[in-house]
Image (cartoon, rainbow, N blue to C red):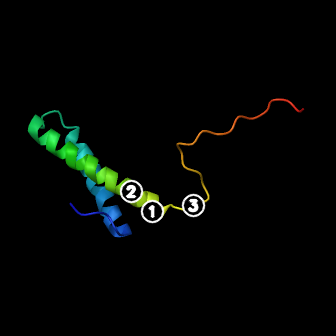
Amino acid sequence: MKQIETFEQRQTALKWMVKTAEELSHPLLPAEDRDYKMAVYDYVSGQVAQYNKKLYAGSEYPPLDTEPAPQKLYKD
């Protein structure tokens, strides 16, 4: 499968992900279809995440997965 390389491709992938998430939530979707669509959805989601890392690299905001430093509650 191809990688997401442009902002337009990212936007198209996000629209596809919303549509597919609605399809996956349908209770009558056959299990075989659900498994295949979920695998493709996971792949596209990973591609969007990789593109976002490149897009926002060097941003002034820290990544969300870092833990803040503990603060002192009193003065020394």
The reply to whether callout 3 and callout 2 are in contact (CB within 8 Å) is no
Marks 3 and 1 sit apart, C-alpha to C-alpha, by 10 Å
Residue 11: x, y in percent? 34, 62
- The residue carrying mark 3 is 59
| Quarter residue 34 falls in | top left
Residue 63 drawn above or below residue 5: above
Residue type, numbered disc 1: Lys
Q: Quadrant of the C terminus?
A: top right
The reply to whether callout 1 and callout 2 are in contact (CB within 8 Å) is yes
| Quarter residue 26 falls in | top left
Q: Is residue 30 visible?
A: no
Q: Is residue 42 left or right of residue 64?
A: left
Earlier residue among tags 3 and 1: 1
Residue 32 drawn above or below residue 50: above
Q: Secondary structure at mark 2?
A: helix
Instruction: Decide which of 28, 13 is in the foreground and name it.
Output: 13
- Residue occupying the point 75% across, 35% down: 71
Q: Secondary structure at mark 1?
A: helix
Q: Is residue 29 left or right of residue 52?
A: left
- The residue carrying mark 1 is 54
Residue 35: x, y in percent? 16, 39
Residue type, numbered disc 2: Gln
- The residue carrying mark 2 is 50
Residue 10: x, y in percent? 34, 62
| Quarter residue 16 falls in | bottom left
